Image (cartoon, rainbow, N blue to C red):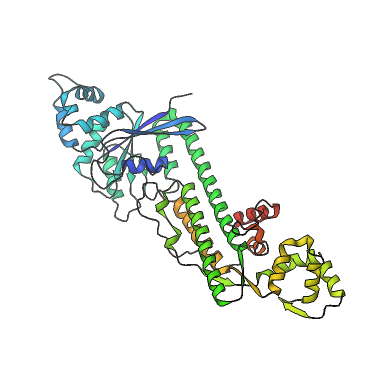
Amino acid sequence: MTEPLKLAVVGHTNVGKTSLLRTLTRDVGFGEVSHRPSTTRHVEGARLSVAGEPLLELYDTPGLEDAIALLDYLERLERPGERLDGPARLERFLQGSEARQRFEQEAKVLRQLLASDAGLYVIDAREPVLAKYRDELEVLAGCGKPLLPVLNFVASSNHREPDWREALARLGLHALVRFDSVAPPEDGERRLYESLGILLESARPALQRLIEDQQAQREARRHSARQLIAELLLDCAACRRSVVAEPAQEAAAIEQLRQTIRQREQRCVDALLKLYAFRSQDASAEDLPLLDGRWGDDLFNPETLKLLGVRLGSGVAAGAAAGAGVDLLVGGLTLGAAALAGAIAGGALQTARNYGSRLLGKLKGQRELTVDDGVLRLLALRQRQLAHALDSRGHAAQDRIKLGTPQDNSWRDGKLPEALNKARAHPQWSSLNAGARLSQAERQEQLEALVQEL
């Protein structure tokens, strides 16, 4: 096993070094992020591995605070007639008392960079190019290690990227990476590691493995997110509550269904946050509008009628032949009520036990409360929007996720996926109903079809 590549993350104080590491490691708890200067006081490390093999070690370092004074001090260290190179001059500095006193923070940075294979020099691209940054780069260059500038916060509207590009080029630093630890570009990590591979040719195979592994992980997260959303939609589409058609009981049942769906959506939100390694407080279904229920005769939707026709046809026909005379017109299908009751009583519904009690309940004046198509659309829109926000969110982000008006017209106006229409006829497909049977092959088939549509 080869030694992992060691990278020191360096730069001025409060430019987002810890934020960058949080995003690269997908760890919202790494280090401490604050708007206060000099938040990081010690060197902290993190390791990235593939298949158990460590490939990259990242070291967060304190911010450089007084590079101008340090550069002046270093220039005075040479004795008359000496011509020390950068590393030799820094070693002399690190052995002296000033490295333990006045320049203690800078000494920590330099020791780590000297012990590393390369450094990432993090720049807050919103800041103007000042003399202190040029002096920092000159001090760091004395370590004799490759430096890759990282322009952080380039997603901000007030960044100064052109100024920084020009200044870095004048210092001989032509290779750089655009990044944003709060809203990283989709290819940001790949570009960073590819640029490192140019500076460190021997590390290129390990960095390529890291790129491929992270891309595979990203695709796996996206697929898992679609599965979580599909489970939510299938659960809600198949959810139903039977209630006596009496105003007080209806109102109570509607409120209960609202709470059930709201809680189920929150479980989906929590699962998505966990999947993307964010905190539970980063998003919540409570920020979103209330859901509405509806009264619906979904017992007799087309899919249910199709199943009834296939599974109950012979029994109902036999009952009708026995002489039932009162017809009930439902959804375009004429059934003999007495024949229906006789068929149920006679055991003709044994091949469709899922429907017998529901049919009897309807004859007794009960209604079924189900989730409206509009609510399913809303659930799909905002959970898809949340998944997209998490997929493009950096782990240094501190603000709560705010979802705007969904723009996904296919879910706003288009036809609902057939899997959800089928779920209407299968209450046993919902974990929200009693007697759920979630492992049925047909349910799994429809769930996978819904994942593909998402």
| Residue 131 image point, x, y percent | 19, 41
Residue drawn where x is 43% and y is 25% of the image: 3
Q: Is residue 408 visible?
A: no
Q: Is residue 39 above or below residue 303?
A: above
| 237 versus 388 height, above or below | below
Q: Is residue 315 left or right of residue 407?
A: right
What residue sits 54% from the left and 75% below the top?
A: 248
Q: Nearer the viewer, residue 297 or 344?
A: 344
Q: Is residue 254 visible?
A: yes
Image position of 420 with respect to 337: above or below:
above
Between residue 214 and residue 158, name the one nearer to us.
214
Q: Position of residue 66 (x, y in %)?
A: 18, 37
Left or right side of 372 for 35: left
Is residue 328 or residue 414 the one in the foreground? 328
**Residue reaching furthest top?**
81
State the quadrant of the C terminus. Answer: bottom right
**Number of numbered discs on residues:** 0
**Where, by quadrant of the figure, is residue 432 drawn?**
bottom right
308 or 210: nearer the viewer: 308
- 302 left or right, relative to 324: left
Q: Which of the 4 quarters of the picture holds residue 322?
A: bottom right
The residue shown at (52%, 66%) is 258
Q: Position of residue 7 (x, y in %)?
A: 36, 32
Rendered location of residue 191, percent (x, y): 42, 42
